[in-house]
Image: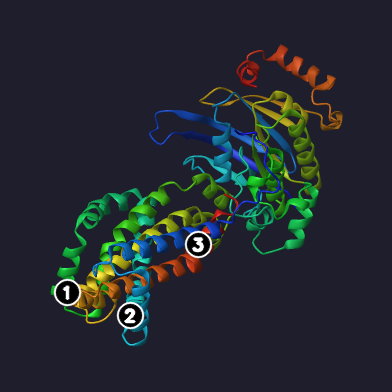
Amino acid sequence: MANEAVNPHTMPIAPVYIKLGVFALLMAVWQGFAMLLDVPDLPSLTQTLQALYYHTHEGDLINNVLITLARVLISFILAMLIGSIFGIAMGSKAWFNNISESLLIILLNIPALVVIILSYIWIGLVEAAAILAVVINKVPTVAVMLREGARTTDTKLAQVAKVYQLSWYRFMHAVYLPQLYPFFLASARNGLSLIWKIVLVVELLGRSDGVGFALYSMFQFFDIAGILAYTMVFIGVVFVIELVCFKPFDLRIQRGR
Amino acid sequence: MSSVDLNINQLSYSEDSGSQTIIDHIDLAIKETEFICIVGPSGCGKTTLLNTIAGLLNSPNATVKFSQADIRLGYIFQEPRLMPWLTLQQNIELVLPQSNPQLVKQVLKQVGLLAYSQHYPNALSGGMLRRASIARAFVIQPQLLLLDEPFVSLDSPTAMKCRALLLNMAKQHQTTMVFVTHDVNEALYMADRIVFLSNSPSTIIHQLVLNRSAQQHSGDYESQHQQALKSALFSQHPKILEGTLATS
């Protein structure tokens, strides 16, 4: 009931404890399930942690993760930059949208694998081809989101900027871009998850280092604990990026809205 | 601080397609520090007229001339139009060419919002937002201030307070004011001169010069003086206010 009396002695549980609790429960379920089945195809949590320790100290885990992270970062920055410029231009200029819309639809629908293979064939098995393949795959989705953002910007606020003769920089910084920040954030979150996945495929197909290459090597030897250990690190890195980069930005853009 | 004269000649405005004329050949001269109220029925083109003066709309054959080349223009829109992601202080500071926290504080104090300077617009009431938009307009010390029915959605006591605040600030800053409303009472209360527009395509159908000294802005919104003026206006031009009052 809406007007149900609230017990003042009942303190709400902080969200961080709820999240940690759910995480611990998942780990416990994994451990219990693996112990119950006791098959080599499903290593337990403890076996995976042992594999993680091994690959960190004896193997190339840190090196591979750093290489993949560098590829993800470069691709992410390029894709966000190019996609944002195209998206904003398409959303704010009807003539540019008319010219580019067909190209955008084509790029959105070409399978990622086709772009990766063609990049390797046309450019060669080099770093530039790997990065280009990832960027081409991601740019259209960023452009689509930012185009929608640019279409929903409030022209009334732009009128305020015009009447009060704001400089271009001040207009962009204080009036126009803040309206697009939620779209940037959604696009960045979505983009990071997609880029991680594409980078692994790119590494698997044509690189001799990185997480994708390491996963492929472990697949050859059915090292499932190793694969899960890499996946754990992977998830850990994504959580760190979420907490360090996206969450503070998210909190900032929510102010006043 | 100097105010400006404003001369509008042959101002016409049509929609992009040209199918509908909204404003039809308006000539208007506004003197320095004058408080003009433009009154007309809803949809007659009052906002279009203000937007054309502000340069937000282009009227190809019209001339809108100011007595000075580069003027400081303020505009209080129908909605407060504050940036939701900026605090009140940041919103006011935004329109200043250079940061001047002292001036911002001074203006916020004048409108009674100094205590709310770090609040975001979504934490303020409608009346506070109107006062904030008044503060934003006056912080640039405008020579000409355009106002588009700024108090239209406020309750009566709050609107009255805002009107008094506006009159006080206009007097203090010696600003030329062009105030659009469809409320004759509001115009009678505030203006030095009232310009009546017809229905669209709008033209000026009557002008009424008020003796400012006779108006005391006593806070009595519809004083005997105003009622007398309105009656006189009705008896002389019964059709002028027909549409105006129907919407007010």
Inter-mark Cα distance, 2 to 1? 19 Å
Crowdedness near tag 3: few (<14), some (14–19) or many (≥20) residues, C-alpha within 10 Å: few
Residue beneath disc 2: A67
User: In terms of sequence position, does the residue under pointer 1 or pointer 3 come before the other?
Assistant: 3
> Label 3 sits on what residue type?
Leu
Given this view, does label 3 or label 2 mark the residue nearer the observer?
Answer: 3
Residue at image position (48%, 57%) is A181
User: In terms of sequence position, does the residue under pointer 3 or pointer 2 come before the other?
Assistant: 3
Q: Are marks 3 and 2 on the same chain?
A: yes
Q: Is residue A29 left or right of residue A223?
A: right
Q: Is residue A189 left or right of residue B130?
A: left
> Which chain does tag 2 point to?
A
**Residue B229 point in image, percent of width and height:** 78, 20
Inter-mark Cα distance, 3 to 2? 29 Å
Residue beneath disc 1: A120
Residue at image position (31%, 84%) is A60
Secondary structure at badge 2 equals helix
> Label 2 sits on what residue type?
Ile
Tell me the quarter of the image containing the C terminus of chain B.
top right
> Looking at the image, which is closer to me, B205 or B20?
B20
Crowdedness near tag 2: few (<14), some (14–19) or many (≥20) residues, C-alpha within 10 Å: some
**Residue B6 point in image, percent of width and height:** 65, 43
**Residue A53 point in image, percent of width and height:** 37, 81
Given this view, does label 2 or label 1 mark the residue nearer the observer?
Answer: 2
Residue at image position (48%, 40%) is B61
**Residue A234 point in image, percent of width and height:** 36, 71
> Which chain does tag 3 point to?
A
* Residue B148 seen in render: yes
Question: Which quarter of the picture shows residue B81?
Answer: top right
Residue beneath disc 3: A20
> Which chain does tag 1 point to?
A
> Label 1 sits on what residue type?
Tyr
